[in-house]
Image (cartoon, helix red, strand yellow):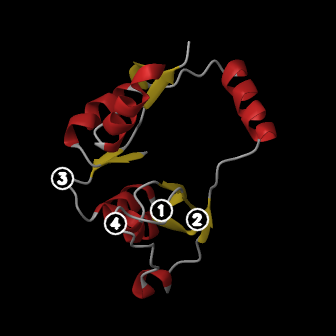
Amino acid sequence: MAVTSRSEKVDRLRALGTDLVVSTADTPEWGAAVREQTGGIDLVIETGGPPTFAQSMIACALYGRIVLLTILDAKGGTVQIPGPVYQRSLATISRLFVGNRTGLEAMLRAISVHRLKPVIDKVFAFDEAKDAYRYFQQGDVFGKVVVDGA
């Protein structure tokens, strides 16, 4: 299951094997739509921060888990737990921080063993790192933006 802010990405996500895709452009109240279609999500990876957190709470299963990748928005606002939504949820909410070397090595082993191939949107040369960052910041990426140091 995936949620995207751009309708143009729906077909690409389905081609990658996502069984249910909801576009927030087409369904602004996507939390209720996700909950209706799934019965509630057990694990929500919340990447949007304050603007999307309430919808993630609504989409989450009663005893689900929400992992926050960011708690701030571009204007410095922070995630607020909406009272009415929170009162009917027993979800666990936690933050995810950059891991340690052991975690990175375990992840790399898992990627190798399972032969996972990340989706790469665009590759930049090392001397184009500033351009890569600007490209990423504009927000219309599909997959990873890579800076190649070779």
The numbered mark at residue 26 is: 3
Give coordinates of residue 17: x percent, y percent: 43, 29
Residue at 50% from the left image edge and 59% from the top image edge: 70
* Disc with the residue nearer the chain's start (4 vs 1): 1
Label 3 sits on a secondary structure element that is loop
* Disc with the residue nearer the chain's start (2 vs 3): 3
Which residue lies under the disc numbered 4? 51
Asked if the residues shown at circle 1 and circle 2 are in contact, with their CB atoms under 8 angstroms apart, the answer is yes
Q: Mark 3 or mark 4: which is in front?
A: 4
Q: Mark 1 or mark 3: which is in front?
A: 3
Which residue lies under the disc numbered 1? 40
**Number of numbered discs on residues:** 4
Which residue lies under the disc numbered 2? 64
Residue 35 placement, left or right of 103: left
**Gap in angstroms between the C-alphas marked 2 and 3:** 25 Å
Say which quadrant the N terminus sits in: top left
Q: Amino acid at mark 3?
A: Asp
**Gap in angstroms between the C-alphas marked 1 and 2:** 8 Å
On screen, residue 105 above or below 6: above
Mark 4 Cα-neighbour bin, 10 Å: few <14, some 14–19, many ≥20: some
